[in-house]
Image (spheres, rainbow, N blue to C red):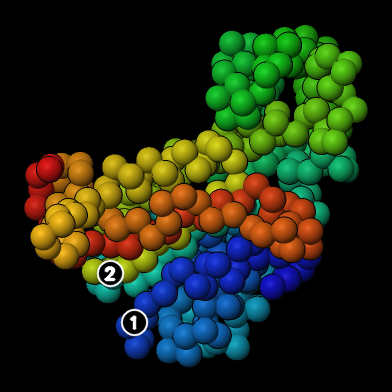
Amino acid sequence: MVNGGHVSVLLQETLDLLTTKNPRPLMVDATLGLAGHSSAFLERYPNLRLIGVDADAEVQAIARARLEPYGERVRLFNCFFDDFFADFQGKGEKPDIILFDFGMSMYHFREARRGFSLQSEEVLDMRLNPSTGRSASALINEVDERELMHVLNDYGEEPFAKRIAQAIVRERASSPITTTTRLADIVKGAVPAKVRYGRTHPATRTFQAIRICVNDELGRIGRALNQAIECLAPDGVLGAISFHSLEDRIVKKAFREREIKVIRDKFKPDVVSPIPTTEGMRGLLLVTRKPIEPGAAEVSANPPSRSAKLRVARAGPEPYPGRSV
C-alpha cells in the first residue's frame, strides 16, 4: 500500500500473523505514520477499532485525513509511543493487536525538511516532535568529542566514529554546523578515501546515529515494548518491524525474556507452561522464532524494505505467576 510515496513494509505478512478472534477487536498502531498498515487492518476487520499513535503532528495530520472515512472507529494520539503506553497501561480495555513499525516514513526524508535527508540542504533538526528535546544541530555543536564518538559508535555502529567526531569538533570551532550538506561533507572528508564513493553515502550511519540519539529511539523502544506487552489482552498479539540490528536486538530480547516454555513429554500432548522464564513478567508465546523478512518481489519493488524484520508474539494466559521456572 502506497501513501504519499511511502510503501507499507511486510504488509501482507503483518496481516497474516497479527490475527484476532475477537469480533470487535481493539488495535493500537503505535507508529501510525501515514496509516498504511492501519488502513489495511481497518479493511480486514470491519468492526475493528483503532488507536493510532504518532509523535509527529505533521505526519499525523496526513494520516487523520486518510483515516477519515472510518469515522468513530479511529482515535488518534499525538505523542511518543512509550509515553502513550505508560499512560494507557491498566486503563480500560486491553488491545487485541499492537503493531510497531520502527521505520522512518518517506515523508520525513522527502518533505519534512528537518534534516533527515542527505539528498538536499536542510536545517539540522531531526526531531520527530520539533517542540521537545534537543535538535541535531544542538547535539553536534555542544557535546564533547568523546560523547560524540560514543553516539556515532553506539547508535550508528560507525567504524570511523573517532575520525568523524574529531572532524566535527575541528570544523565546528570555526562556525556552528547547522545544515545537512555541511555535516555530510565533513563526514565524507573524514572517512578513508576508499569508502567515500560506495553504494551508500558515507554519512548515512552518522545521520542515523544522530537521529536515534536526538529522539531517544532505542530507549523508547525498550520502554514501550515492555509497557505494551503488559497492556495486551489475553491471547492478544504484538508485532514489531525493525530496520537495523540495534532495534531488532531490543525486540528479540524483550520477547525472549518473557517466552513461555512448552513442556514436551513423549507420554503427553504438548502442554504450555503457565509461567514465563523471567520472574514477575507477562508471558509470551513466540509466533515467529526467527524474524520474517521481505521476499525478493517486495525488495525489488521497494528497495528500502530489504532490511526490515518482523517479529510477532502472542500474550499468554492470565493470571500468570510472579515466579520463574
Q: Which secondary structure lies at badge 1?
A: loop
Q: Amino acid at mark 1?
A: Lys
Which residue matches tag 2?
235
- Most foreground residue, 133 or 270: 270
The answer to whether residue 273 is visible is no
From the top left corner, tell me how far across and down residue 216 is, in percent: 51, 38
Q: How many marks?
A: 2
* Residue furthest front as drawn: 266
N-terminal label among 1 and 2: 1
> In the image, what residue occupies the spot 28% across and 62% down?
315
Q: CA–CA distance between discs 1 and 2? A: 9 Å
Q: Look at the numbered discs 1 and 2 and tell me whether their residues touch, using CB distance below 8 Å.
A: yes
In the displayed structure, does residue 173 sit left or right of residue 181?
left
Q: Which residue is mark 1?
A: 21
Q: Is residue 297 above or below residue 241?
A: below
Observer-nearest of 59 and 222: 222
Q: Front-most of 224 and 62?
A: 224
Image position, residue 261 (x, y; %): 22, 51
Q: Is residue 271 visible?
A: yes
